[in-house]
Amino acid sequence: MKKMHSINRRVSRTIVAIIIALVASTVFTTVLYLDSRSQYEILNQRYSLLQSQFNTLQENYSLLKNSYTSLNEKYVFLESNFNTLQTNYNNLRTDYEHLSLEYNRLRDNYSTLKSSYDQLTLQYNKLNDDYSSLNYSYINLKSDYSILISQYNSLQYTLKTWEQLHIGTTLATYYDYVRANIVTIGGYPLAEEKWWVFPSYYKMSATFAAEIAAHDAGQIYWPGLENGSHYYDYTGEYSYQTAKRILSQALLLAGVKPGDDNVTKIDKIMNFTNSIVHYEHRLIDHMWFPTETLTFRSGDCTSFSILEAALFEMVGIKSAIGLFVNSQGEGHAMILAHLDSLGKYEYYYYPDLTSFGLSPGQWIIIEPQYNSIYQQQLYQDKWISQWKLVAAAEVPYGP
């Protein structure tokens, strides 16, 4: 019994020990489980985080893979370009080496060329100075040449007009013959000198002036004097034919055309006459024929009037010689033109001069010493208005 009791106590102790062991094991296991579960949850959280990071990395990987593929393609393209550029570089380098050699050769020649250039520069500067001096002289000479050409042309024109318009001694002496024989007073030739002092000379002087204008325009006059002077025998033509030929040339030089209106014709004749004839006093004041005035390029108021009146008649403008005096006792000669008007210009006129022996109708005063009707319009109020008509004679020209 004692032995059984002892076994029972040992069994009990064993059981207790087992129970304690089981309890301890359970506690340990529980503790271990709790600890493991905590770690599991921690690991599970870390796993979830790592899983998320993995997914992100997976996506980044895909993107990087795509980028890599694109970059790899670009790399291949760039590598190809690089190889091409490398080849070009090698070729350029070869060219550079050749050019470098050429450059070195040229640089060796540069010093020689520079020296030559400096010498040429000095020579150029000297030549340029010489050129400037010569150019200045050339400009002066050119200016002098232009002046001389202008003078030469003027002289040529003067010579040409003189050759075409001058008269010779035969016609000049014929005019003297006429003046000595056609009009006499008391057995002496009629002189124009101071005709305005003697009223009895007025009409006679105006008539003679009109007749010599008609003669040079080509009208047959004084046939007895033509025969008595033997002019035709010496020249083969009559004096009025010679004179008309010269006056016809004057009209050509004046530029008068058949189609010109009367105002244009008058303007051209006035301009031409005053371009070659200037006013000049004469010591022996007798009346000059138109071609005499052209030959000497000078004359007084009567000379201007007779010349232009003859030219007016030749272009179809009926004219008369008018003699005038003023309050100071001075005499003057002007032209009277048988016209209805002077176009746009203002003018002085007589509505009728039949009392002076002229044809009926209006007679316009023309001052032959003006170079145009326009110039006459500018000054006529002061100049023409002072003169009083004392004698007039119509140029007896034409049928």
Image: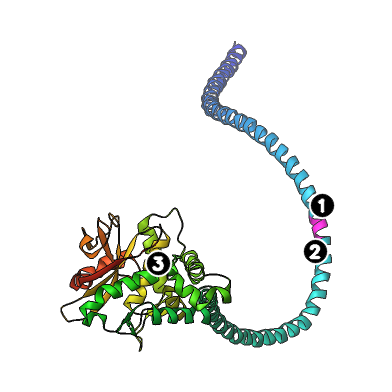
Span shown in magenta = 89-93
Callout 2 touching callout 1 (CB < 8 Å)? no
Point 30% across, 75% down: residue = 205
Nearer the observer: mark 2 or 1; the answer is 2
Q: Type of residue at label 2?
A: Tyr
Give the left or right position of residue 69, taking residue 185 as reference.
right
* Amino acid at dot 1: Thr
Judge whether residue 270 can be spotted in this image.
Answer: no
Q: Position of residue 352 (x, y in %)?
A: 21, 58
Q: Number of numbered discs present?
A: 3
Quadrant for the C terminus, please: bottom left
Q: Closer to the camera: disc 2 or disc 3? A: 3
The amino acid on which the numbered mark 3 sits, given as a three-letter code, is Ala
Residue at which label 2 appears: 96
The residue that mark 3 highlights is 214
Residue found 72% across the figure and 42% down from its top: 75
| Percent coordinates x, y for residue 109 in the rendering | 80, 79
* Kind of element beneath mark 3: helix
> For mark 1, what is the residue?
87
- Please tell me which residue lies in front, 16 or 277: 277
Query: Which callout, 1 or 3, points at the residue further toward the start of the chain?
Result: 1
Q: Quadrant of residue 383?
A: bottom left
